[in-house]
Amino acid sequence: MAAQVPVLGEIVGLKRESGSRRLASAAPSDIRLRNRTAIMRALYPKTWLSRAQLAKITGMSKVSTSDVVAELIKDGLLIEGEYKNLPRPGKPALDIGFNQDAGCVVAMDLSDSTHIRALAMNLVGGVLLREELDCPPQAVLDVEAIRELCNKVCQGCRSKVIGIAVATPGTVNDEGLVIEAPNLGWVNMDLPSVLADVADCPVVVANDADAAVFAERYFAGGSPDMILVQIAKGIGAGVLISDGIVRGRGFTAGEIGHVVMSGGTVPCVCGKTGCLETMVSVPVLDERISKDPDGRSGILDEAGQNLGRALAMPVAMTNITQIVLSGPRRLVDETMVQATQRSIDALARSRFMDAVHVQLSNLGEDAAMLGAAAMVLRKELSVL
């Protein structure tokens, strides 16, 4: 992903005092942080530039650029590459690049109905190792199982763990408190506190669908305006508009799994009857297919049609034209994609609406974990 780097100046704000306006200089620490961020964004993830090129791109002086680069090399975040010959006489320029192995992020996904998955990734999204822990169906997910798996992956990392990221179903606030996750049996679960002492690093907890749409955008070249539907033990949607995740008041935006559908008759864990989740979730589809293996195609086609019915209204309201489906490929396949596409087209397509494109996630089942990890990179390194 090519990140846009802001041109930095010495003055960053205006301050009113005694009825007049005067320029207010940034504190030295603020300027230092902005300069470090500008340099890293110019190089992230795999761009190589000379110090002179970095100075030109960021608007910093050559002296300031050299100082910041030296500091970042000392911190291990940048590395020196090869010399490149210039088209004019003079000393060859030495390329500088982002050090993808300066640390790693451990990410976990709690959305599966049968096991907890985890991975460690380097600082540009490369997966270093994977682990998973079987988790038999239970009313309340045991947090000790989460700690156990997280600790195992952290112990397997060869570089410093700069953050732990958790993608979970349910409603999650800005502090990472899981306000409610019906499919996990949780209310007000403080996961950051549970995992705080595992690796002595920050813990970021995010809704799984929000994390997945973030990953699709930054690691798979997705549109700045899209809806990603996470199909797992439950159903959730991550909504991205103008590169901003729509979370809604109370952090409940995207909870389409608990919208009651016409014709639905099955009780849902939320207390209602006939929710989308009772028609399209992984456990429901697995059970139906196990009872009727020969009817697999028809079952997935029906699930896609129901999903399209649920998505038609938000598509019409936002004019979002990219819909991404994420989930296990044994279920979330082209059959479901095509049925979802047909359903949306039949219900929402008109001469007033742009054509909608439904597709599978380019990241597969890793989407939520990679997105949660990317949120750590944004928080800790400001590279995204």
Image: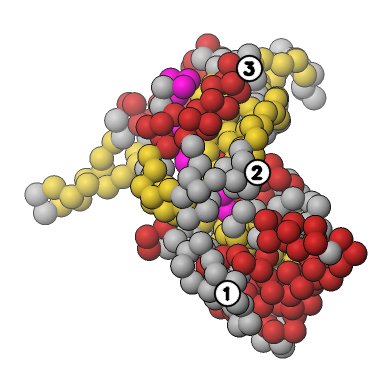
**Where is 265 relative to 127, above or below?**
below
Classify 268 as above or below 118: below
The three-letter code of the residue at mark 1 reads Gly
Residue 46 percent location from the top left of the image: 70, 30
- Residue occupying the point 63% across, 14% down: 158
Q: Position of residue 89 (x, y in %)?
A: 76, 17
Q: Is residue 228 left or right of residue 183?
A: right
Foreground residue among 144 and 194: 144
Which one is in front, 40 or 349?
349
Q: Residue 238, image x and y in percent?
A: 57, 58
Image point 58% across, 34% down: which residue? 107
Q: Which residues are magenta?
A: 198-209
> Residue 136's image quarter?
top right
User: Which image quarter is the N terminus in?
Assistant: top right
Left or right: 237, with 298 as reference point: left
**Amino acid type indicated by mark 2:** Thr
Residue topped by disc 3: 156
Q: Which residue is mark 2?
A: 114
Quarter of the C terminus within the rendering = top right
Of the numbered discs 1 and 2, the one sitting upstream in the chain is 2
Q: Which residue is mark 1?
A: 274
Label 1 – label 3 distance at C-alpha? 44 Å
The answer to which quarter of the image holds residue 275 is bottom right
The kind of secondary structure element at disc 2 is loop
